[in-house]
Image: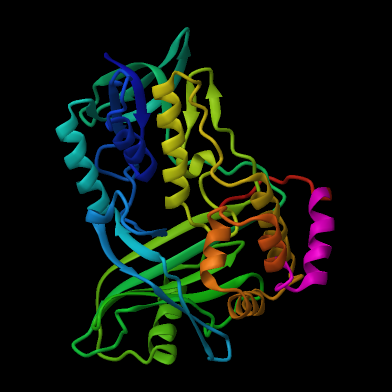
């Protein structure tokens, strides 16, 4: 049995971020003891991931950043490029292995966090706290009793929602012996891909050098593809669109991110909370999660230090979530053509302003101005429909 002020279940981006924030000293506060319960090697351990986000200037995780850019490019379906300089912002790429190594180094030096490698079987609410029941890889039972428990594990199923799409993708890490990429520019949304009957598809290129990049094929649609279909889409994109020849695939990654207007239960017991994607940290209309995780875990850490109930906040405002619900319905119902919608938006609104909007940094008059750059009548039609849509269970990917 382990005793702690805080137990964190899951050692992905959210769990590691919260543990890391709780090790930072705050004047006049008592250091909190933390137990971080991570799954042993196997299917329950978070897969390797590449996370991207944007921020101005230096950030707390820059030592783990693979590369950053200030030039982002969008290609219309007809091929015309739209390029944006997002200064003073930088678009940053972090590999999950590098992020974990950085956090592990800091945690080891703090002395506040104990690591437990075990599979969590249940979380039991108790008077004045909760108990995490787990089983180690060799079959032994273990337990953590804590005043507060934060669960960052993925949900087994999504909550009912008016609209749920999936952002699903497959990417290749490619290497060539010739200059195939511009290392100073991200292909942020390349709409020259064949568009699905429902939703949206695009290519995405993160160049880490003139001959190296992560190249992804992404769809926003109701269902995932087969492995062969992803590979075929990537062969078409790398060959017919990017014109790549004689390249080596050095690795791959696959992911599915729910884009949903569902309400996520962030409190599941008097002392038990969900954080990360399971706690609503994902921006519904884009799938970006890393920056939302940072805002959410910062708020939780501040509440714990100040002795307030540490209910994880939703990192996106109610107004932002309402606008996202309208866009998701417009895409899902076919009221707007996804490729035309985003082409028009990127061509008429400066990307730094769009990125500020996605981070909740815009004011109402700026958001109205952005809305006027979209197909107004179809979006108004979607806005009138959304409040009347009943929540429906999602059958799963």
Is residue 397 visible from the viewing direction of this image?
no
Residue 385 lies, with reference to residue 74, above or below; the image says above
Residue that appears at 37% across and 70% down: 171
Residue that appears at 39% across and 83% down: 235
Residue 159 lies, with reference to residue 191, above or below; the image says above
Q: What main secondary structure does the magenta stretch of the protein show?
A: helix
Residue that appears at 39% across and 26% down: 121
Residue 197 lies, with reference to residue 180, above or below; the image says above
What segment carries the magenta color? 371-387
Splitting the image into 4 quarters, where does residue 17 fall? top left
Is residue 125 visible from the viewing direction of this image?
yes
383 in the magenta segment:
yes
Quadrant in which the C terminus appears: bottom right
Q: Is residue 191 left or right of residue 233?
A: right
157 in the magenta segment:
no
Number of marks in picture: 0
Splitting the image into 4 quarters, where does residue 194 fall? bottom right
- Residue 108, given in percent of the width and then of the height, sits at 16, 34
Splitting the image into 4 quarters, where does residue 135 fall? top left
- How is colour applied across the structure in the image? rainbow
Quadrant in which the N terminus appears: top left
């Amino acid at each position: 049995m382990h005793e702690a002020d805080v137990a964190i279940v899951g050692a992905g981006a959210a769990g590691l971020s919260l543990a890391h924030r709780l090790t930072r000293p705050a004047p006049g506060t008592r250091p909190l003891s933390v137990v971080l319960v991570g799954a042993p090697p196997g299917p329950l351990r978070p897969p390797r991931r590449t996370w991207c986000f944007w921020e101005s200037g230096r950030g707390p995780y820059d030592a783990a950043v693979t590369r950053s850019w200030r030039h982002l490019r969008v290609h219309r379906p007809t091929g015309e490029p739209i390029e944006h300089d997002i200064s003073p912002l930088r678009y940053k790429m972090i590999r999950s292995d590098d992020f974990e190594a950085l956090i592990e180094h800091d945690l080891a030096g703090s002395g506040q966090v104990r690591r437990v490698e075990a599979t969590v079987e249940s979380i039991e609410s108790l008077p004045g706290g909760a108990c995490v029941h787990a089983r180690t890889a060799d079959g032994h039972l273990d337990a953590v009793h804590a005043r507060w428990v934060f669960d960052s594990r993925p949900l087994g199923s999504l909550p009912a929602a008016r609209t749920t799409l999936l952002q699903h993708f497959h990417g290749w890490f490619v290497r060539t012996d010739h200059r195939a990429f511009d290392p100073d520019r991200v292909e942020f949304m390349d709409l020259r891909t064949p568009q699905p009957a429902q939703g949206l598809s695009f290519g995405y290129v993160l160049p880490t050098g003139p001959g190296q990049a992560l190249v992804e094929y992404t769809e926003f649609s109701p269902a995932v593809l087969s492995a062969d279909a992803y590979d075929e889409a990537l062969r078409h994109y790398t060959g017919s669109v990017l014109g790549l020849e004689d390249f080596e695939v050095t690795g791959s990654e696959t992911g599915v991110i729910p884009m949903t207007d569902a309400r996520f239960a962030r409190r599941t017991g008097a002392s038990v909370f969900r954080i990360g994607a399971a706690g609503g940290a994902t921006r519904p209309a884009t799938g970006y999660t890393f920056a939302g995780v940072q805002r959410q875990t910062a708020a939780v850490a501040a509440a714990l230090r100040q002795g307030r109930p540490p209910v994880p906040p939703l990192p996106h405002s109610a107004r932002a979530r309402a606008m996202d619900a309208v866009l998701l319905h417009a895409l899902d119902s076919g009221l707007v053509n996804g490729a035309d919608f985003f082409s028009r938006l990127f061509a008429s609104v400066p990307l730094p302003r769009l990125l500020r909007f996605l981070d909740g940094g815009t004011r109402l008059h700026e958001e109205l101005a952005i809305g006027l750059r979209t197909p107004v009548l179809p979006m108004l039609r979607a806005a009138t429909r959304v409040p009347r849509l009943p929540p429906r269970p999602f059958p799963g990917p």
